[in-house]
Amino acid sequence: MSSRDVVLARVRRALADVPRGEGPGDVPVPRDYLRTHGSRTAEERVALLAENLAEYRAVVHHCAEDDVHMLVMRLLNEHGTQHVLVPPGLDPWWMAAADPVRIHDRAASTARELDTVDSVVTGCAVAIAETGTIVLDGSPDQGRRRISLIPDHHICVVRVPDQVVDSVPQALERLDPARPLTWISGPSATSDIELDRVEGVHGPRKLEVVLLSE
Amino acid sequence: MSGTYLGMPAFPTAAASSTQDGRLRANLRYATHTIRDKRAKAVAELDDWARLRAAGAAVKDRTLRHLDHYLEQLEEAVTAAGGQVHWAADAAEANAIVARLVRETGEREVVKVKSMATQETGLNRTLAEAGISAYETDLAELIVQLGDDLPSHILVPAIHRNRGEIRDIFREQMGRWGRAAPEGLSDAPGELAEAARLHLREKFLNAKVGISGANFMVAETGTLVVVESEGNGRMCLTLPETLISVVGIEKIVPTWQDLEIFLQLLPRSSTAERMNPYTSMWTGTTDGDGPRTFHLVLLDNGRTDTLADTVGRQALRCIRCSACLNVCPVYERAGGHAYGSAYPGPIGAILTPQLRGTASELDASLPYASSLCGACYEVCPVAIDIPEVLVHLRERVVQGGKVTRRGVKTVLKPAKGHAAERAAMRAAGFAFDHPGVLRAGQRLAGRTRRLHPRRLPGPGHAWSDTRDLPPVPAESFRDWWRRTRGEEQGK
Ligand code: SF4
């Protein structure tokens, strides 16, 4: 007997108390929990997102479409960035004023090559106001999972209010499980040493979120 | 300590020595109280917490009652998404599968994300025997590994170490494993974290094989979920060419939508955050993004035996948030090592004796490692009635009864030569030696009695019938402690 058969047979024997006719759907799951915690206008939602992101020590910027290229340029310059990673589908306008050398992430690039890059600029799939979370799903304006991980500085542009939802349940509804997903709430952090919070153990130490009004 | 739980003394013995360790106790007390206060605030933010908790428990019950169905569905979905599924009936088999998979890649080094399952199976030792170096990459696990030590807490495994000890470990050990600690490394947490960052980045950038566990597996879609803070998880899950995930069969949730419950319950219960810094979700393999090969090893190792017990089964709902550790007065005093298992604290006291059986004295003593105060049940985000299972297991230890071991139904004899009663009495002696434990227990027991309308069967019953409870000390426990053991409260 294969181990698969062994384990499944054990499971079935262990569940002898479950009545024969019972199907999985017969075990009730109450779903009376809330879809969102409180009701907000689009503006309030964006404000809450900004507040929660900032509490997690992400740096939040507000910006209009016309100015976003100047803001991105300034943020890269302030960080002293010489090389910036750019996913293939990023809106070229966002980078229109930036001086640093653009690096494109090819499947063949090694992680070691990417380790020499200073910053990365990405879009996002959805942002969650209640938890201060941005979610990347590998779409062309976000690129492979590794590009928002290896460089020390991540600039993420969120289109507001379109890409902002209130809650975790609403975010899941919008996401496609077939895509690789990365949920980010503030910069990488650890509290493993006497519970002192230290930012940026392995992921980017600096997360800047640009809330771009359309 | 030599990186193994085998041959650990029974809980009361281990606890008796760890409670003499002032620094350990001070570290633990500070940590558990800090986390639990923060957690209470994070939970209070959601006014539907009780409903989320009920939904979480119900989803897990649905999963467990139809686990065969969901396992098959999961296997199909993972396979369809390009992953390969392996089944392991016990720890040895899981370790052998992983060692073989690593060997087939031709690699001799692997990077690991913190994983309770591989801690449980002792995977690192098997890999070492096969000539494969496994690098733990979670900062706390790194501290534990470099110190040739054992984890003592689910969430913060190196909680028993303070910054000075960590600096010494880094200075002395990092160079043996790879990049040495920087000259003049101080004990500032920021500097220590930076040293770990530099040391581990070498590993991540070279790694061809990653090994992980998972917090959740979605049967409907074949999606795996890992929740973390540092980014070491993301490194291990996305940079290597091959990813091997070892996951207990109970970690399934049926649908994508079900994640909405657990992604609210887990971070708030665990690190007391609205959301943890990073959550990764992957479904099989994705062309051009992340590992090209994905293996999922489904681990039984006593879980089906636990499932066969209709009272004890609820322990399999556990999402390893560690909230129960942080409220437990016994854990706070005894520390995680005393439980002799990858699973310490209240959940360990009910899970370990079910996964491993109660044949050893240690495992037989674990159901007594509690004051039955009920605090663990109150904080548990999936409403596991830990006191109920503790009492049930005590009864089993003492009176024997029907159990399933390695899939075979047997009848357990009552513990021989009053071994169990001895274990019970020693545990009781431990509690009476530490009045704070007892009083905290009594106080909370009073407060939660309404929630636990049950008799104490087995030894608890006989025991409370025939013995006088010791008088409550006249002075407060803290005063007593200061007076008798000196100042060592830490921060
Ligand atoms: S038993 Fe409950 S509280 Fe304890 S770790 Fe598991 S889920 Fe968390």
Image: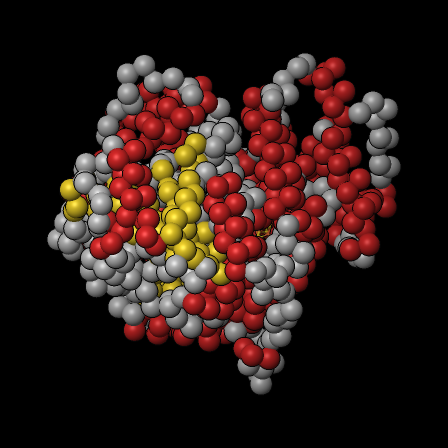
Is residue B7 or residue B412 the one in the foreground? Answer: B7
The total of numbered circles placed on residues is 0
Q: Residue at x 43, y 32 (%)?
A: A198
Q: Position of residue B195 (x, y in %)?
A: 32, 27
Residue B465 is left or right of residue A137, and the answer is: right
Q: In the rendered image, which quarter is residue B442 located in?
A: top right
Q: Position of residue B270 (x, y in %)?
A: 54, 46
Which image quarter holds the N terminus of chain B? top left
Q: Residue at x 81, y 46 (%)?
A: B447
Residue B228 vs A88, above or below: the answer is: above
Q: Position of residue A25 (x, y in %)?
A: 56, 79
Residue A214 is left or right of residue B10, and the answer is: left
Q: Residue at x 34, y 54 (%)?
A: A65
Q: Residue at x 78, y 45 (%)?
A: B445
Is residue B434 or residue B418 the one in the foreground? Answer: B434
Residue B278 is left or right of residue A17, and the answer is: left
Asked if residue B123 shows in the view, the reply is no
Colouring of the image: secondary structure
Is residue B167 or residue A137 the one in the foreground? Answer: A137
Is residue A211 or residue B45 the one in the foreground? Answer: A211
